[in-house]
Amino acid sequence: MKTTAYFDRLKSRPDRAMIEQRWIEQVIAHPISEVTQSDGRIRIWGLIPEMNHKYLRVVLLADRETVHNAFFDRGFRP
């Protein structure tokens, strides 16, 4: 999985450390929602049943394969 330096710095934060790589890969492979930002980055969401059915937001660069950010999005509504 390709990642940005920004993502690499953030993934050690306590609120991000529990996010498993397989969950990120699952969301990339099977997003339930997708939005392209004006800067070309792509926001995608997926449901993670193992985390009490929370939604994981993954932000990809325009290449659709480099992960820039990933976090549980409390405000997402499908």
Image: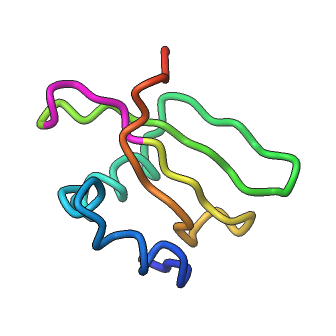
Q: Position of residue 45 (x, y in %)?
A: 48, 37
The boundaries of the magenta stretch are: 51-56
Q: Is residue 46 left or right of residue 35?
A: left
Q: Residue furthest front?
A: 14
33 is within the stretch colored magenta: no
Q: Is residue 72 left or right of residue 23?
A: right
Q: Residue furthest right?
A: 38
Q: Position of residue 69 (x, y in %)?
A: 51, 60
Kindly identify the residue that appears in the image at 73 percent across and 56 percent down: 41
Q: Nearer the viewer, residue 74 or 64?
A: 74
Kindly identify the residue that appears in the image at 62 percent across and 45 percent down: 43
Q: Is residue 48 left or right of residue 46?
A: left
Question: How many numbered circles are shown?
Answer: 0
Q: Is residue 51 above or below residue 20?
A: above
Q: Is residue 18 above or below residue 36?
A: below
Kindly identify the residue that appears in the image at 24 percent across and 59 percent down: 22
52 is within the stretch colored magenta: yes
Q: Nearer the viewer, residue 4 or 33?
A: 4
Q: Nearer the viewer, residue 75 or 41?
A: 75
Q: Position of residue 59 (x, y in %)?
A: 57, 54
Q: Is residue 15 left or right of residue 45?
A: left
Kindly identify the residue that appears in the image at 56 percent across and 29 percent down: 33
